[in-house]
Amino acid sequence: MDILQTFKWPITFVVGFVIFIYFFRNDISDFLKEISWLKTKWFELRRIREEIFAKAEEVNKLSEDLNSDKEELRKATKWFVETFYLTLATRNRFPPPSGVIEEVERKLSSLAEFAIPNKNDRIAWFKNLQAVVKVRKEND
């Protein structure tokens, strides 16, 4: 009888728990399904959140690249305008002052580097331009 007295409450709790599960098994099953569905949605939301942050990071990188490209374009436009101005300002002076020639050559070289980054392609392009100028001089 002592053993029964010792385990009376634990046995009561286990029997009560089994009866509770028996009567509410459909509700418990629905509750567990709901928890499973919420867990799935939670992981889905986490994945979407990570994708959004990755896209935001990509947009920031593209924005930085665009700003850098804009700055490079401004620099190239400035060189072009300076070169064009120096060319027009010294149009009727023959020969143009040596400082102006050097400045125009430096600006044009910078523009050529900006336009054609590959050195070999730039050299071939410049040789082609020299051939065009030579043909025009011969025809004049």
Image: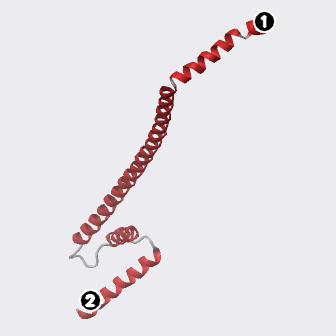
- Asked whether 53 or 102 is in front, the reply is 53
Q: From what the image shows, is residue 134 above or below residue 97?
A: below
Q: Quadrant of the C terminus?
A: bottom left
- Asked whether 59 or 79 is in front, the reply is 59
Q: Percent position (x, y) of residue 39?
A: 49, 35
Q: Quadrant of the N terminus?
A: top right
The residue located at (38%, 80%) in the rendering is: 126
Q: Secondary structure at mark 2?
A: helix
Where does label 1 land, which residue?
Answer: 1
Which residue extends farthest front? Answer: 1
Tell us which disc is closer to us: 2 or 1: 1
Indicate left or right for 18 with 61 as reference. right
Q: Secondary structure at mark 1?
A: loop
The residue located at (46%, 78%) in the rendering is: 120
Q: Percent position (x, y) of residue 58?
A: 42, 50
Q: Percent position (x, y) of residue 108?
A: 35, 71
Indicate left or right for 81 with 21 as reference. left
Q: Percent position (x, y) of residue 26?
A: 49, 28
- Rendering quarter of residue 16: top right
> Dots 2 and 1: beta carbons under 8 Å?
no
Q: Which mark is residue 118?
A: none
**Tag 1: amino acid:** Met
Where does label 2 land, which residue?
Answer: 136
Please rate how many residues cluster around mark 2, counting C-alpha atoms within 10 Å: few if below 14, some from 14 to 19, many from 20: few
Q: From what the image shows, is residue 34 above or below residue 90?
A: above
**Tag 2: amino acid:** Arg
Which residue extends farthest bottom? Answer: 139
Which residue extends farthest left? Answer: 92
User: Which mark is first along the chain, 1 or 2?
Assistant: 1
